[in-house]
Image (cartoon, grey):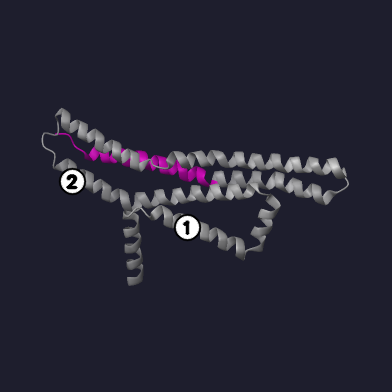
């Protein structure tokens, strides 16, 4: 148990120093490399899917890295930020005047900016993934047509390779986008709820 407490304390220190993103990104890349080396099926899958599949993998890793970072922020950093804002607002006198109201608006704006950080990027990557899959389809079909141009329809093995490059990236792009769809909407709703909750706690006299 002491080891877990020390590990948790270390992660909190890293998050406070803004190194959480780097840690999660490096961990994601290491996990992907280990899976690629250990599992031959994954290597075969990427070989059959073609070069576009690597782009889908990188976008997916970045997207899930940002998703994990957002969950880390909501779990560990936002509560501390909430307490700091409430304490700062509590020390303000004459909370109903114009200057105090502008301070309140600034506090809420800062929380909104930090809470919604990377959400637009996550949504953008979710939209990019199916397009990358479509790009893989186009690349695979071009390969099929090239094979048909030089060998006709008699070389089924080469045609099958092109068909694999046309279908696998599309499937991978759709699956990766769907995997982040619910999580992205959940993070967006949670961000709105947290902003509204903090605004309600900044009571005006």
The part of the chain drawn in magenta is: 179-205
Q: Give coordinates of residue 143: x percent, y percent.
A: 76, 43
Q: Give coordinates of residue 13: x percent, y percent.
A: 31, 59
Q: For mark 1, what is the residue? A: 26
Q: Give coordinates of residue 64: x percent, y percent.
A: 49, 50
Q: Residue at x 64, y 58 (%)?
A: 42
Residue 117 visible somewhere in the drawing: yes
Q: Residue at x 49, y 44 (%)?
A: 182
Q: Secondary structure at mark 2?
A: helix
For disc 2, the neighbor class at 10 Å (few under 14, some 14 to 19, many from 20) is: few
Q: Quadrant of the N terminus?
A: bottom left
Query: Which label number is shown at residue 87?
Result: 2
Residue 1 visible somewhere in the drawing: no
Point out the residue furthest to the left here. 93
Indicate left or right for 109 with 125 as reference. left
Q: Residue at x 50, y 38 (%)?
A: 124
Figure quadrant of residue 88:
top left
The first of marks 2 and 1 along the sequence is 1
């Amino acid at each position: 148990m002491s080891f877990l407490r020390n590990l948790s304390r270390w992660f909190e220190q890293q998050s406070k120093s803004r190194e959480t993103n780097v840690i999660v990104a490096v961990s994601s890349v290491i996990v992907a490399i280990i899976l690629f080396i250990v599992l031959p099926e994954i290597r075969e899958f990427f070989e059959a899917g073609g070069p576009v599949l690597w782009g889908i993998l990188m976008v997916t890793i970045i997207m899930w890295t940002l998703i994990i970072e957002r969950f880390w922020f909501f779990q560990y950093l936002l509560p501390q930020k909430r307490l700091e804002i409430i304490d700062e607002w509590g020390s303000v006198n004459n909370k109903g005047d114009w200057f105090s109201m502008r301070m309140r608006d600034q506090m809420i704006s800062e929380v909104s900016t930090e809470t919604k950080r990377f959400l637009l990027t996550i949504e953008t990557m979710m939209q990019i993934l199916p397009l990358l899959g479509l790009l893989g389809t186009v690349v695979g079909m071009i390969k099929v047509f090239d094979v048909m141009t030089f060998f006709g329809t008699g070389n089924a093995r080469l045609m099958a390779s092109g068909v694999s490059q046309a279908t696998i990236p599309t499937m991978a792009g759709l699956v990766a986008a769907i995997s982040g769809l619910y999580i992205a909407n959940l993070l967006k709703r949670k961000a709105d709820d947290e902003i509204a909750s903090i605004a309600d706690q900044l009571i005006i006299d």
